[in-house]
Amino acid sequence: MKKNILRSALLEFKQHGYRDASMRQIAHTAGITPGNIYRYFASKEAILHELIQPTYERFVGYVLEIRRDMDNTHTKEADSSMIYLHKIQGTIVKLFNQSSPELSILLNRSEGSKYENVKQELTTVIFSILEKAFHTFQNSGSARRQEEENQAARMIAATIVEGMCIILRDYEDGDTIERLVDELIRIYFAGIGDKINRS
Amino acid sequence: MKKNILRSALLEFKQHGYRDASMRQIAHTAGITPGNIYRYFASKEAILHELIQPTYERFVGYVLEIRRDMDNTHTKEADSSMIYLHKIQGTIVKLFNQSSPELSILLNRSEGSKYENVKQELTTVIFSILEKAFHTFQNSGSARRQEEENQAARMIAATIVEGMCIILRDYEDGDTIERLVDELIRIYFAGIGDKINRS
Amino acid sequence: MKKNILRSALLEFKQHGYRDASMRQIAHTAGITPGNIYRYFASKEAILHELIQPTYERFVGYVLEIRRDMDNTHTKEADSSMIYLHKIQGTIVKLFNQSSPELSILLNRSEGSKYENVKQELTTVIFSILEKAFHTFQNSGSARRQEEENQAARMIAATIVEGMCIILRDYEDGDTIERLVDELIRIYFAGIGDKINRS
Amino acid sequence: MKKNILRSALLEFKQHGYRDASMRQIAHTAGITPGNIYRYFASKEAILHELIQPTYERFVGYVLEIRRDMDNTHTKEADSSMIYLHKIQGTIVKLFNQSSPELSILLNRSEGSKYENVKQELTTVIFSILEKAFHTFQNSGSARRQEEENQAARMIAATIVEGMCIILRDYEDGDTIERLVDELIRIYFAGIGDKINRS
DNA sequence: TATGAATGAGACTTCATTCAT
DNA sequence: AATGAATGAAGTCTCATTCAT
């Protein structure tokens, strides 16, 4: 029964985002009265919390782990950065595999809630990784050139994150998600590798 | 004066999206009364229409043009697909360059309006292009393999579109947008080329 | 079991007043389900009725008795009024002593129910008594002076009643209540005596 | 127009108290729609604030003044306490005279708002005064006797405050209020004086 | 006898929109 | 051309009450 409400809420959050999700609509989808939801959840925020919190905590755990890894990696060689990025891929796929719809809401549709900055946090992490990889090769350019590289890295980080979010949005099957995230990251690596080689 | 309102509306739509944009706020930014807006526009939707419609029509025009181009291109050779994709890139950048703020709203912040499916339409077009390019090389696989390629193409199309949307969202300067879109598409091309070569 | 519910209701009414008392809370305190209350009572008002009605009826009885006494007392002498007031004090204290929590709710926390005017009724009675005592001495003033005396009597009546209500509100022990009501009325008598003597 | 709403709100607050006052009802009394109130006030609390805050600030000022006076008075003689109490009376009457309906709400009907403890504060002040007066005479009793005196002082303080609140509740004319408060305090002084003399 | 689910009215509040002036 | 007042529907949430089980 709570399950029933949570299922309706998941649909509604997915469709309109947290802020624009309507309790009326959630209740209607669940086949009950709006007031009745409050027998099971204290508030709209509480529904989101119950739906998202476990995923969020796992998310935070992984991000911390990645950060720790990064701080402990001091290699200056080209390949090691690449290898390191590949290791991270596995971590990310694992996270996505465990709870894709919730993660999708956490990242894409949490505006107006306490989770609304999560996607940006993930982007920042990816950006840090890319920054490291780029600097291994290109710290010799002009100031303007460096700023441009910075923008590029930021853009790439954001698009990688967004790409993963799209996969989450469009697919629910774990294997499919894994395969597509794999594909996405392989494309970016190949593309970035090409970019680095040419510069 | 309509210009004045449109300018305020653009800011508000950019910041909060169509659905959460406030007429009060638009009026306040324009230095007038909410009621007065209705002397110039019939509704919130009408403001969005006047703001976005030209860009939308140009957008549709480009999309049709690309579709026509594609239907007229029957080459089976590998390189021609690649070259063709490069031509498209130019078209897209041009569109972005002409009216980036409106395009950003059209693609990113039109939820709740009649334009809310535009991003998906663009994705479909990009998907068609990729489908063609992929099939030039890989129409020999099993049915399951072909479905997987389909999913991959769909994902790549969506992420390319999303990537361009992010660039629009984060930057306003035409040169910067052009450079970053360039970069993004180059990465995808290199990545996809690598993928095709390996398969 | 009804006793059980009544006990919980008493606590809740005392704490939040009739209007803001929560059936949920009453049920919770009684260790049962809200719905189950309705096997024993038709409504929230019905609970209040069963809790308060006996006290209310006794209250009305005393008031009638006092009224009758008053109508039968035609003495014109000063002291007799004073003595008469002292007799009333005993009656009141007795009433308070018998069922102070219910009386407290009846007088202090019945807003929103059919009992909400009871305090005013009591005030009216006290006022009648005072009026009589005052008139014994002061029926020689001007019309304006008489109206002022009237207002004073009304005010004193109301404050005496309110004073007794406060005592009920703040204390539960019978002896303490008796002592404080005693004190209160003694103060008023002394004060009023002083007032009369000076006029 | 704000005046209109404030007038309706004052009536509603007076009748049902802040917590149980209904915006619907306020709007209805003012002859407008509930939503329209929010053109003039941000919230129910904001209405109360605008209605009460000036009175509250004056109230706090007077209380501080009284406290300061009290701290500076170290006389041990009987009469000085009495004289001191008389001085306070003037201060209180002045306050009551300035804004009686607002003061009535502030003291009697602010439950559920930020002002809900104001009456208790005033009672505490009066209690401090009485404590001082009583101790001047009676610090020689047993512990139990002293506790009883404490309870009596507390009760008297509360009833004096409540008495003044009743006057505010029932009358609006400044002169009448002044006269009745005067009367009330004279009664208490005479009564208390009598009490002290007998002990 | 008792429960837990459910309802419906009403609470405060927001906001696009209308309209008399 | 413009305003400020006003509305009504919808938002989240609470709660006395009902009812099938």
Image: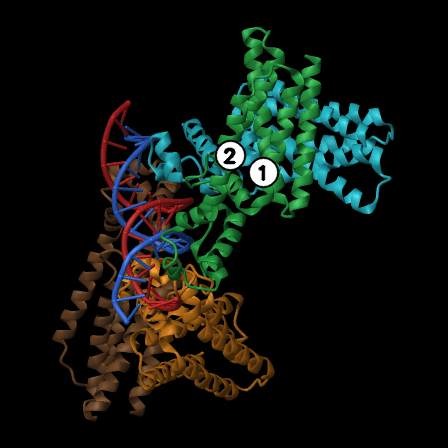
Chain colours: A cyan, B green, C brown, D orange, E blue, F red
Q: In this view, does B138 lie above or below F20?
A: above
Identify the subunit bearing mark 1: B
Tag 1: amino acid = Cys
Q: Is there one chain holding both mark 1 and mark 2? A: yes
In which image quadrant can residue A159 be found?
A: top right
Q: Name the residue under label 2.
A: B119
Q: Would you say the residues marked 1 and 2 are in contact, meaning their CB atoms lie under 8 Å apart?
A: yes
Q: Name the residue under label 1.
A: B165
Tag 2: amino acid = Lys
Where disc 2 sits, the SS reads helix
In which image quadrant can residue C32 be found?
A: top left
Question: Which of pointers 1 and 2 lies earlier in the amino acid sequence?
Answer: 2
- Judged left or right of residue B123, residue A6 is left
Residue B196 location in percent, x, y?
Answer: 67, 16
Identify the subunit bearing mark 2: B
Residue A23 location in percent, x, y?
Answer: 40, 39
Residue A92 location in percent, x, y?
Answer: 66, 26
Label 1 crowd (10 A; few <14 / some 14-19 / many >=20): many
In which image quadrant can residue A173 be found?
A: top right
